[in-house]
Image (cartoon, rainbow, N blue to C red):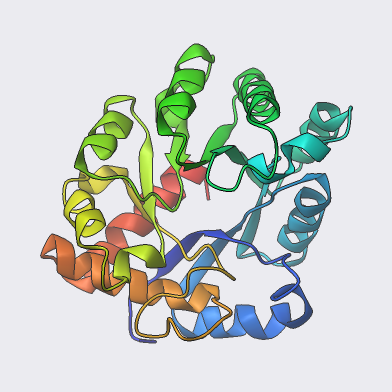
Amino acid sequence: MSDTPPLIDTHCHLAHGRLRPQVEAVLARAREAGVVAMVCAAGNVTDSKAALGLARAHGDVCALAGIHPHDAAEAPDDFLDRLERLAAGERNVAIGEIGLDYHYDFSPRDAQREVFAAQLALAGRLSKRVVIHTREAFDDTLAILDESDVDGADVVFHSFTGGVEETRRVLDCGAMVSYSGIVTFKKADTLRAAAATVPDDRLLIETDAPYLSPEPVRKHKTNEPANVAHVAARLAEVRGVSVGALAERTSANAAGFFGL
C-alpha cells in the first residue's frame, strides 16, 4: 500500500515496550507506507516524557502528555505540574490520552473522574487540544467534558467505538472522531454504519499501535503505524470514496487539529 497518498496516524504508542526497542524500523516502515506524521500517545508521566523525547528526535513524530484512566490511581501528587511542563514542549500537541474506562476499572471510578476533570482544567488553562479515551463510560465522559472549560471543537474521541446515537452526541458537542483498526473487524458492522455518518471535516484515523491490528493483518500481535493504511482503505470503502480522497481529507483534518 506504499502508493497510498500521505497518511497521518493520529494515535500510536511508540514509547510502548513492544515498539520502542525497534522504533527506527517501525518509523521506516511507516514512512514506506506513506505515513508522513505520527502522534505519539501517552498514559502516564513517564510515558509522556518518553513520547516528547521521541518527538524531539524525529521530525515526523509529535507527542501527547496525559494520565490514562487506567493509571489515574497511581498518578503522582504533582502530576499536573509535571504534565504542564511537558505540554509546554514545542513538540507536544495535546493533553491525552485522558478519560474514563469502566470496562476494566483498573483505577477506582472516583479517581478516574477526578484525574480526568483535573486534566481537562489543565488543557483549558493552557489552550491545548484534548485526546479522550472512553470505554463503557460514555455518559460520564460527556458530562465531565460538558462541565469543563474545554471547547468541544478542541477534542477528539480516539479509537471511537460508539454507534450512531453516540456518534451524533459526540458530533453535537463539536468534537472530532477518530477510528482505529476496530473499524476493519469483521463483526464491526454497527461501528462502520456510525463511521459513515461522520462529516468529512470531523474524521481522523489512527492505529492505536501496538494494539488493535486491523484486518487483513489482525493476526499480528503487534500493530504499528504503517497499518493505518488499512484503516484508511476500509473507511474509504465504507464511505464510498477513494482511498486517496479519504487519506487527503483525514490528513488535512489531522494537520489542522493538531497544528502539524
Question: x%, y% of residue 146?
Answer: 45, 17
Question: x%, y% of residue 180?
Answer: 41, 61
Drawn side of residue 250 relative to residue 77, left or right: left
The residue depicted at 78 percent of the width and 79 percent of the height is: 21
Name the image quarter holding residue 66: top right
Residue at the farthest right position: 77
The relative height of residue 93 versus residue 144 in the rendered view (above or below) is below
Name the image quarter holding residue 234: bottom left
The relative height of residue 253 versus residue 132 in the rendered view (above or below) is below
The residue depicted at 62 percent of the width and 25 percent of the height is: 113
Drawn side of residue 19 relative to residue 255, left or right: right
The relative height of residue 14 versus residue 197 in the rendered view (above or below) is below
Question: x%, y% of residue 155?
Answer: 46, 34
Residue at the farthest left position: 240
Q: How many marks?
A: 0
The residue depicted at 16 percent of the width and 54 percent of the height is: 193
Of residues 35 and 216, the one nearer the viewer is 216
Q: Quadrant of the N terminus?
A: bottom left
The residue depicted at 15 percent of the width and 60 percent of the height is: 239
Question: x%, y% of residue 55?
Answer: 71, 59
